[in-house]
Every structure is written in structure tokens, then in C-alpha cells.
Amino acid sequence: MNKRRFFIQLIFLVVIITGGVRFMIYIQELKQGIMTGTRPGVVEGFLPISALMSFKKFIMTGAYDFIHPAGLTLFIFIILVSIIFKKSFCSHICPVGFISESISLLSKKIRINKYLFHILTVVKYGILGFFGYMILWQMSVRSIDSFLKAPFNIVADAKMMYFFMPPSRTTIIVLAVVLLLTLISKNVWCRLLCPYGALLGLISILSPFKVKRDASACVDCRKCTAVCPNDIQVHQKGRIDSPECFGCFDCVSNRHNDECLRVTGGLKHSYLPYIIAGLLAVTVISAMSAGYWKSSVSNEQYRRYLNVINQVGH
């Protein structure tokens, strides 16, 4: 793993964990009747379904969602950065991707047959297709607006927290299976199961920055393939157009010589971790300043739904 990328990923992991702890404290304070806390917007980044709905509403009506505005802001940022810099969100920001990739460093690195791999990706593309069809095709703007304003969506971040804390037996079993599979083969969650990554992978095809291999300069050392977090056989490709490409460019950083691999579009790949971090920082600060980060839901309203969270349905 590229040291610069690892450093940026580690920083984002700390920021997200800190946000999660702050959110837990906020919830506990509300339960105790302390109404002065502020709900951290970073947790809304874990509500992609709500964000997709609010994104459709925004595109169709121009109206921004102020129930979970940080979630929509982050969603738009992630979509745009994926169009330009491929799946750089997955390779530089996503904490789940970072953990999965880190665990993969200890894995047996058993390759999945390419035909079997394509069959197994049906899971993530199937989930993506289902939600894409239901939200983008079936749901009207009116029904989306009703969902976004419903109690279920308002406390969706709290419901997500309670899903993991404490985790149910089913949650523990699923996480254990994913962990075991990741120890056997590279990055199983990102490659086979994550529907968000599937969406970003399809979008990333539009990126002008792709890895191109010069066969005449290649010495078949396979260093590029060895470091690829998604097990793409870089040494066999002429150009990496796969939606599985993370856009981490670790393959280029570990190339045998300067001619065998390059990034099209003139991108200085070694600076990409700082570019992504800088763009996200500017986006968040700008959103905070412009009023597109803090939720319009008051602590009193949030607490009211929080007290009956087990009765709140979608």
C-alpha cells in the first residue's frame, strides 16, 4: 500500500471514528435531556440510500435535503470525484475499504477464477440494481419527499448505530464470514459485496485518468499485479478500464521502470492522496459555511423520535 495513501486513509479513519464517538455521546446526552449538543454530520455519510433519494429530489426539483444535508453533500462529492479520479473515494477515504484492504495484507491471496468472480459480483450489482430501480425509476418525487421527512429517515443514523451497538447474532455472523473470506482472498467486501462501490465503479469508467501499460517496456515482473488491492491482472492488460480499479495507482507507484506503466491524462498520481483530502476538506468547509451541512432537525424533534425509535418504521 502506498505510504501517502495509507497516511490519508488513517487520518480519515480517525476522523470518522471520532465522529462516531461524538454521535454516541450526542445520543446519550439527548436521552438524559441535555439538548445543547450538535449531531456530527460525518455519520450521514453512512446513509447512502437516503442520500440517493435526496439526490434524485435535488436533480428533479432543485430542492436540497436539509434533513440529512451532510449526507447529500458527501454523496455529490463522492459522485463527482469518482467521475474525475475513478474510485478514489474507495481507495483514499472509505473506512470500510481501508479496513478491508489492511486485513487483505494478511490474507492468503488466493485468486478467484475470473469466471467465478463475474458470477459472484452479481451480489453487489444485484443490490445496486434493486435500489437503483426502486428509487430512480419507481419512486416519485412526492413519495421520496414523504420518506425523507418520515421519522424513520430522520433517526436513520441512530438506527444504524443501534444495528451495530450492540451487534445482533446475525450481524456478528455476517461480519465474521466477511472477515474470514477477506483473510482467504483479497478485499472480498469491496470486490464482491459493496453496492456503493459498484455504483462508483460504473461511474469511474468516465474518468480520463486510466492506467496504461506499454507491453514493449514490460519485463513481466508482475509487481503491479501483486500490489493491486482488487487483484486486477495489470501485467496482462493494455489499459485498465475495469470498474473494479480503485484509482489508487499503487501499480504505477511500484512499476519496474518509468515506461512500462503510466497514468493517462497527465495526472501526477503521487499527489492524488493530498488532492482527494484537500478537495474533501474544501467541500466540507464550504458546505458548513453555506448552510449545507447542519441538519434542520432540532434536538427536541430528534429526541422525540429517538425515544420511540423501536416503534419507528419506514
Image: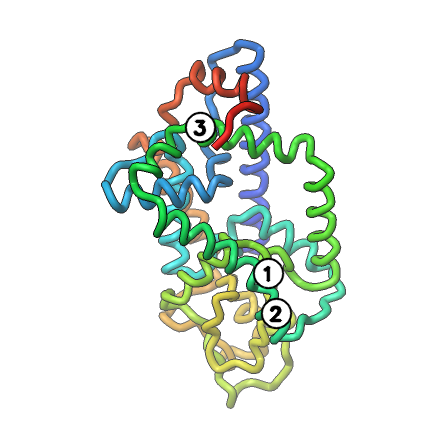
**In the rendered image, which quarter is residue 71 located in?**
top left
Residue bearing the label numbered 2: 117
Q: What label does residue 9 carry, if any?
A: none
**What crowding class fits label 2: few (fewer than 14 Cα within 10 Å), some (14-19), or many (20 or more)?**
few
Residue 158: percent from the left, percent from the top?
54, 28
Considering every residue shown, the one lying at the far top of the view is 33
Amino acid type, residue under disc 2 in the picture: Phe
Amino acid type, residue under disc 1 in the picture: Leu
The reply to whether residue 279 is visible in this rendering is no
Earlier in the chain: of badge 3 and badge 1, it is 3
For the N terminus, the quadrant is bottom right
Q: CA distance from mark 3 to mark 1?
A: 30 Å
**What crowding class fits label 1: few (fewer than 14 Cα within 10 Å), some (14-19), or many (20 or more)?**
many
Mark 1 vs 2: CB contact within 8 A: yes
Please, what secondary structure does the residue beneath circle 2 have? helix
The reply to whether residue 75 is visible in this rendering is yes
Image position of 78 (left or right of 250): left
**What crowding class fits label 3: few (fewer than 14 Cα within 10 Å), some (14-19), or many (20 or more)?**
many
Q: CA distance from mark 1 to mark 2?
A: 8 Å
Residue 4: percent from the left, percent from the top?
55, 55
Earlier in the chain: of badge 1 and badge 2, it is 2
Residue at image position (34%, 37%) is 143
Mark 3 vs 1: CB contact within 8 A: no
Amino acid type, residue under disc 3 in the picture: Ile
Residue at image position (62%, 84%) is 220
Q: What scheme was used to colour the molecule?
A: rainbow
Q: CA distance from mark 2 to mark 3?
A: 38 Å
Considering every residue shown, the one lying at the far bottom of the view is 216
Residue bearing the label numbered 3: 154
Residue at image position (41%, 57%) is 82
Q: What label does residue 192 carry, if any?
A: 1
Residue 97: percent from the left, percent from the top?
58, 52
